Amino acid sequence: MPTNPSLAARRKVLGAAVETTKGTKQAMAAAMASTIVYDAKMKPDGIFDDGERAPNLLTGGTLPRTKGLQKGSLTFRTEMVHDDQFMTLIQGCGFSVATGSGGIDTATPTTDLNAQKTLTFELWEGGRRKILYGANGTFTLEAAGSAQRVFCSWEFSGIFETPDDEAMPATTPTLTKGYRAQGMTFTFAAAAIPPMDGFTLAMNADVQPREDLTKATGLGYFIVGDVVPTLSIAPEARTVAQYDTYGKLLAGTAEALSIVLTDASSNTLTIASPKAQRTDVDDGDRNSKLADPIEMDLHVSGGDDQVTFTESA
């Protein structure tokens, strides 16, 4: 047996917690409950990029670099499963979450920096542990095709802690099957659109550091300056009389969007926007059928309401 065996690339466990004090590591000892995670990667992010030292010298060459902001990044994907940690993670993406009666949670963007939360993440890799705290990020929901699983891709920036060794926490695999792109409701202005095979909904959150020269890392935590969602779809083409895609584009029409995902247990995730506006239409071919790939911006109507997520059982 080797003295120092290799660490298996797939053997990873990811934990996340909302911080009680922004920019202060939140203690945790467990992975995210009921959450199916793929491709988790945490790393330092350009800590020495601004530290190059090439002064006037008698010789050529450079001097050892100096550290800058001790920031890091975390990327991973999750299957969208009811009652997973989506409503926790979204709080680190410029959203606030309100819990209503009957187990209904609603997430809404907030530009109130005091109201925004930050997250701590711990990624256990075999016997090694990485930590990212004071984190905020953005995410993209995507269904690659009809009847395919709905995934969420997450990108977080935060303060990168020096890794240490810690045994991986015990976890129980999540067997629940999540949302799929089938049996969905997908309407604009309460009217159905021609058939399509998938969608991509990106938050495009503006994630920025809050610098603090009193901190050893040079950072207080990360904030979200704005959430500017976009939607990409590719419905089948229709005649103008049947569905006037180009007429809506040229008129600058903004319509209420409603997307409802339903799982096998009748749990739902409803995505809504009051003002979905077409910004571009392309010419597509999907399996010998003419398609109209559409790019859309999701706008506000009466406040921070450009997009909302409501989860109910």
Image (spheres, helix red, strand yellow):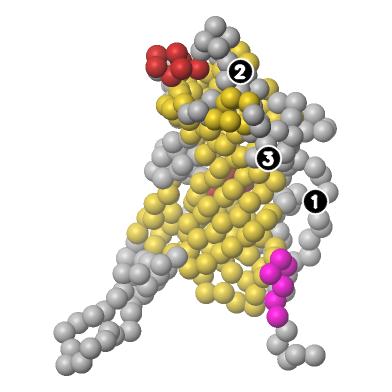
Residue 25 in sight: no
Compare residues 26 and 14 and report the one nearer the observer. 14
Query: Which residue type does callout 1 highlight?
Result: Thr
Query: Which residue type does callout 3 highlight?
Result: Val
Q: Is residue 245 above or below residue 225?
A: above
The residue labelled by disc 3 is 150
Query: Which residue type does callout 2 highlight?
Result: Ile
Compare residues 113 and 242 and report the one nearer the observer. 242
The residue labelled by disc 1 is 174
Tell me the mark number nearer the camera, choosing from 2 and 1: 2
Q: Which mark is residue 240?
A: none
Q: Which segment is the magenta one?
A: 6-11
Compare residues 129 and 20 and report the one nearer the observer. 129
Residue 246 located left or right of residue 62:
right
| Residue sitting at x 45%, y 13% | 247
State the CA–CA distance, disc 2 to disc 3: 20 Å
The quadrant of the picture occupied by the C terminus is top right
- Point out the tag, 2 or 3, that comes first from the N-terminus: 3
Where, by quadrant of the figure, is residue 272 drawn?
top right
| Residue sitting at x 59%, y 25% | 290
Where, by quadrant of the figure, is residue 165 drawn?
bottom right
- Point out the tag, 2 or 1, that comes first from the N-terminus: 1
